[in-house]
Image (tube, helix red, strand yellow):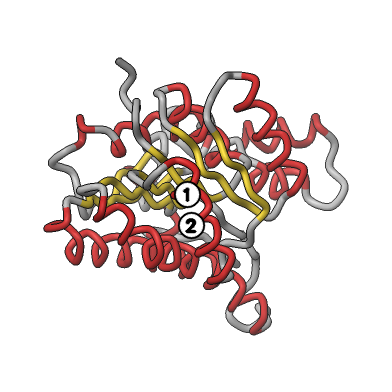
Amino acid sequence: MKDFDGKVALVTGTTGIGLATARRLAAGGAAIIACGIDRAANAAMKAELASSGAEALVMDADVSVPDQVRGAVAAGVERFGGLDIIVNSAAVHPYGTAVSTDFDTWNKAMSVNVGSIYLTAHFGIPEMTRRGGGAIVNVASVQGFACQQNVAAYATTKGAIHTLTRALALDHARSGIRVNSVSPGSIRTPILEKAARGDHGSDADVEEAYRRFGEAHPIGRIGEPEEVAELIAFLCSAKAGFCTGADYKIDGGLTAGIGVK
């Protein structure tokens, strides 16, 4: 028997960590409900999961919009019969200080990175409760602990995810729902690639940037989405049955040495 046989998982974000997590949960036997705004990425995920024989419903949906999240949850429950797991991976990563970040950008970061977690919980937890419980994993960041310069909005959202994770865990523990977060360091994702490439960088420039980013981590490299997906899968599984209300760093030792010269 696979570790997620009979389970239904909602995953937000269809690239990077979201894609790797959907693959891992599907390989474990879960039926997948996935949603994101990148239609090309959605189509690619749909084709990949179908070719692997996984049960999957991949939808174009903006997870910061209540009606679209409500619709995704409802469609998934109708198709698969319920909901057991939520993985919130969708995110935007604006750069800027509080002065240089305009209000629309600030609000977008809040509504996507934090608001989507509220929305999947708001519409998803009642369905999970009907199934007798489940697990939620929110993708935060080491930026929620010790941020760099010029990421005021992004870092704020990641700190908020840590707090919201604890609140959800306390509020819904007696319903059998466990809620945790993971905080990655630099991971090979489209968001990191965009930062590495800049405006005109070549593929070689990106790889050189990844090498530099990796040097900041004691382990000496950046992480892979599949590594984060394995941690998420553990937290979603019965093996993590006593884990709730906590954050789990997966950062190659990055934050262990911050401030050390």
Task: Classify residue 238 by image quadrant.
Answer: top left
User: Which residue is nearer to you in this view: 10 or 229?
Assistant: 10
| Residue with the mark numbered 2 | 74
Q: Is residue 159 visible?
A: no
- Callout 2: few (<14), some (14-19), or many (20+) C-alpha neighbours within 10 Å? some
User: Which residue is nearer to you in this view: 244 or 192?
Assistant: 244
Q: Amino acid at mark 2?
A: Ala
Task: Classify residue 15 by image quadrant.
Answer: top right
| Residue 17 as seen in the image, left or right of residue 203 | left
Task: Classify residue 63 by image quadrant.
Answer: bottom right
- From the top left corner, tell me how far across and down residue 165 is, in percent: 30, 60
| Residue 177 as seen in the image, left or right of residue 91 | left
Height in image: 202 above or below 62? Answer: above
Q: Amino acid at mark 1?
A: Glu
Quote the CA–CA distance across marks 2 and 1: 6 Å
- Callout 1: few (<14), some (14-19), or many (20+) C-alpha neighbours within 10 Å? few
The reply to whether callout 2 and callout 1 are in contact (CB within 8 Å) is yes
Q: Residue furthest top?
A: 1
User: Which residue is nearer to you in this view: 130 or 244?
Assistant: 130
- From the top left corner, tell me how far across and down residue 124 is, in percent: 38, 58
| Residue with the mark numbered 1 | 78
Q: Residue furthest right?
A: 200
At x 36%, y 33%, the residue is: 233
